[in-house]
Image (cartoon, coloured by chain):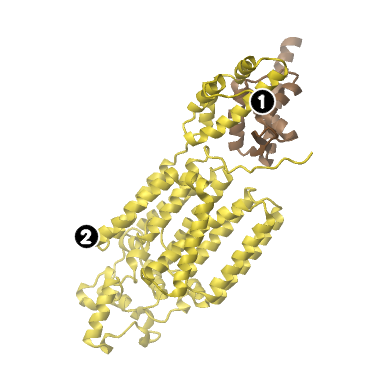
Amino acid sequence: MDKRYMALGTSMLVLKLLEQQDMYGYQIIRELEQQSQKVFQLQEGTLYPILHTLEQQKAVTSYKQTVDNGRVRKYYAITPHGKLLLTEKAQEWNVYQTAINQVMGGVLFA
Amino acid sequence: MHKNTSDSSISCFLEEVTAQISYKPLRPSIRQELENHIQDRVEEYITLGASSADAEQQALRAMGDAITIGTELNEVHQLQKAPFLSIITALLLLTGFGFSSFIRWSPEQMANGLLYYIPGAIILIFTALKGYPLLIRYRKKLALVICLLYLAQIAIFFSENHYFGWDLTYRTLYFATLLLIPVVTIMLYRFRNNRKILLLTVFGSLAVWMYFTYFRSYVTHTALIIFILSILTTICFMIHRGIIAGAKRKLYPALLTLLFFLGIPLISSDREEFTAFINPRAAVYSTWDDTYNGILIQELLSKTPFIHGLQLSAVEMIDYGSGAWYFASRDPQKIGFNPSDKSPEELDWILKTMYEHGGLPRYFKYPLDNVTLWDILPQHYHNNYRIAVPILLFGWLAGFALIAALGLFYLLIFSCINRIHGQLASSLAFCCGQCLLWQGVFYVLGNLGYQYASFPNLPLVSEGRLSIVFNMLLLGLIMSAYRFDHIIDDPLPLKPIAPA
């Protein structure tokens, strides 16, 4: 897949997950695996540059929370700007998806 | 649980990731986040029945290539540079130094200029390179120290024990008031989510403000109005960016009401200063008034052509220098002072004092055929009229070029601030930018003949003393906040876990 759409897809999925609840990095990976029935299995480390980029774009914000085992986790939460960005990304994705379907449909059913 | 020793493969992986991050202070937080992720994964594999070593190896495989992750994170967290802002800052500093050194050139004047411009430049470079990280680390201590220093300075005024001289104490209090602007901004940011303390801070500041403006006049009104405008616009900025959360429909009217109450003392407690600003002609009494400077500069600027300097006959110059052009037709008794009333000793002393302070009218020392434009310029022209003087000397074109350079300087500052994403960084940079902007606005207005209270300073250009040092600090903070925006996160809130 085109790299641009790969990145678009990943950040869109991350925002979509964060729209449901605040999550930390590992939790996002787990949710992504479970909700996609293991179709989306990222190289886990590549999630963090995406999260940090989204944070700089003010699409997500973060806070720390100490959990039972004493570990301090960094949680990410979607912002109103992030929700707006998600809508835009979803629209962009729909255009891409429609174009793919049209071409594939044309090839298959011509 | 997996024990992470320094020579374990997890440690090596984390070392390799963080080694790609060029800004070292950022490494620990990234390392902690990745380490937590790996440990979570290792625990999961162990729960599924893997041995500790296998779980570790599988978790690292799942993470991907350490160098790629580190390089991508480094790309996200790059230091930002502002080359155009740095260039125009250097040019304006040179312009200011040129003015300070050459307009009344003497070795002492030049040495005096260097005494402030060199430390000012060092402060700017140091603050731009290190200011924001240091401020984040020591912000509470710094805020406390600045507040204590401010109170100590006010105490000096109460005791009237001006060991360092009244002028220096007065000036430091002026700039200390401006330095409080970033301190108040940090407090607003700190308490933005705690409505009670936020309201207490606002109303506490309001009470102190009322007290100072109604009953105490040791803080110049110019510093106070710059302070209040900078703080209010910063609050607007914080509301606009959602840093102060709440319904904008309620927050903006509340802010306008606050502005109204804060503005009343400024207008009512010293009506003369306000009248002199709005309509200088209604408030002038003699050529010794600051207001007269404004009227004179308005008159001279109105006669200056576009492409070359002002040209006046000797008679016209004497007329302007003496104030006769304005006062003679109204009340001849109010033309400055009459030298024929003074004894030769008194006259010598007055002229000597006026000369030392760059005062007017210096035409007393010149015969009619030797008077020049320099002899009739308003008092303190070498500091206060650094925009008006080039216009008078070279025409409005030169003045527009200077004003355009200033406009470009502020445009670059605010375009940098606009690109800052961090909440604290952007708020802090914005308030410092406002402080520099309002000084410039009041300075330019003063140069066009509309002076409010005491003359402010033009950052980087005029009054190359404490102004340089303090304004370099503010500008350095802006540059530093911009530089580290992609690197230093806002201090993260630590949220307690909600009870199940």
Identify the residue at image location x=30%, y=85%. B338
Q: Disc 1 versus disc 2: distance between alpha carbons?
A: 70 Å
How busy is the neighbourhood of tag 1: few (under 14 within 10 Å), some, or many (20 plus)? some
Say the numbered circle drawn on residue B131: none
Q: Nearer the viewer, residue B332 or B306?
A: B332
Q: Nearer the viewer, residue B341 or B496?
A: B496
- Which residue is drawn at the image coordinates 58% and 31% (left, top)? B32
Q: Inspect the image, locate mark 2, and give the three-letter code of the amino acid beneath it.
A: Pro
Residue A92: tell me if it is visible: no
Indicate the position of residue A73 as horizontal and vertical percent values.
65, 34
| Residue that numbered label 2 is attached to | B107
Amino acid type indicated by mark 1: Asp
Q: Dot 2 lies on which element?
A: helix
Q: Is residue B431 left or right of residue A68?
A: left
As drawn, the chain in yellow is B
- Judged left or right of residue B320, residue A88 is right
Residue B419: x %, y % from top left: 53, 42
Chain of the residue displaying label 2: B
From the image, state the color of chain A.
brown
Identify the residue position indicated by label 1 in the image: B40
Mark 1 or mark 2, whichever is nearer to me: 1
